[in-house]
Amino acid sequence: MPKVTQLVLNLQSKPGVLANLASVLGRAGVNIEGVCGAETAGRGKIRLLVSDATKAETALKAARIRCGREEAVTISLENRPGALAEAAQKLTQAKVNIKCVYATTAGAGPVAVVLTVSSVPKAMAALGG
């Protein structure tokens, strides 16, 4: 279970914002490996896992798009009912708050889950990493 760095952007919620962001990164040769976005009060908070965070930050800065970094953990879970519940319960027992979670499945096979948590070291210990 690796610790990862994700980019965090607070952008206006309007048509074309995600398209522009993805275009900037695409032109820079940066692959988006994970994305989570939510809207609150006309603003969008986007978390990105990218192939090269430093390259992405440079491209975003050149495009006048501000971003920050935050640590997260990724875990691989079985693609079955209850797998996420078991992992979340371990974090509950370790008193680790999950601030954000996103995942995807492509049918069969393991599920990659990204967890933004209150304490990365405690989360990694609780999850066996």
Image: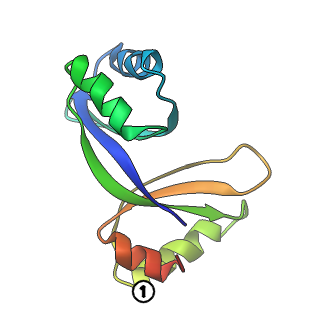
Quadrant of residue 91 within the rendered picture? bottom left
The residue drawn where x is 47% and y is 82% is: 126
Q: Which of 1 and 13 is in front in this view?
A: 1
Question: Within 10 angstroms of label 1, few (less than 14), some, or many (20 or more) residues?
Answer: few
Which quarter of the figure is the N terminus placed in? bottom right
Give the answer, above or below, for where 98 lies relative to 91.
above
Is residue 37 visible in the rendered image? The answer is no
Q: Position of residue 118 (x, y in %)?
A: 29, 68
Which residue is drawn at the image coordinates 36% and 21% (left, top)?
Answer: 21
User: Looking at the picture, does residue 110 appear above or below residue 66?
Assistant: below
Q: Name the residue under label 1.
A: 93
Is residue 41 something that shows in the picture?
yes
Vertical comparison of 110 with 65: above or below: below
How many marks the image carries: the answer is: 1
Q: Where residue 64 sits in the image (x, y, percent)? A: 19, 19
Q: Judge by depth and name the residue closer to the eye, 71 or 13.
A: 71
